[in-house]
Image (cartoon, grey):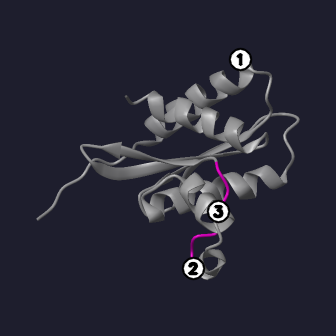
Amino acid sequence: MLSKSVLSLVEANSMIDAAFAEADQNAWKVTVAVVDDGGHLLAMRRMDGCAPVAAYIASQKARSAALGRRETSDYEAMINGGRTAFLSVPEITGLLEGGVPLRIDGQVVAAIGVSGVLPNQDAQIAKAGIAHFN
């Protein structure tokens, strides 16, 4: 039998707190979503002033990072590099930079997705949430 770490709600919210701190420091308005390793939503918060669509995009970025076990920037780079067939992959719809998986003991146990600012800024915020565990 295999065993793995599982992210608690308290830990998911602490990731969001760390991500929000990074966004606040830069005066960025974002939505942050955290999912489990199967892409199921654990927690999500949208800052006042952030566009409502960011809630949908952030959760899809997190889901795609969890299911694919990689940063969503990798998908965006593949597509921008000409591999447009990747757009048809089922269940992986958050193909924009800003989704980052959380690895514990080499296994993906969760992922975070951020939306609301520029792609590299979304990723910066997401990585601040992940760094909370490193």
Give the residue number, with chain letter if any, for mark 1: 25
- Left or right position of 31 against 17: right
- Magenta segment: 91-97
Nearest to viewer (mark 2 / mark 1): 2
| Amino acid type indicated by mark 3 | Leu
Mark earlier in primary sequence (3, 1): 1
In the figure, 21 relative to 90: above or below? above
Q: Quadrant of the N terminus?
A: bottom left
Element under label 2?
A: loop
Give the residue number, with chain letter if any, for mark 2: 89
| Amino acid type indicated by mark 1 | Gln
The alpha-carbon separation of the residues under discs 3 and 1 comes to 26 Å
The alpha-carbon separation of the residues under discs 2 and 1 comes to 36 Å
Give the residue number, with chain letter if any, for mark 3: 95
In the figure, 58 relative to 26: above or below? below
Name the spot of residue 37 as percent of width and height, x first: 41, 58
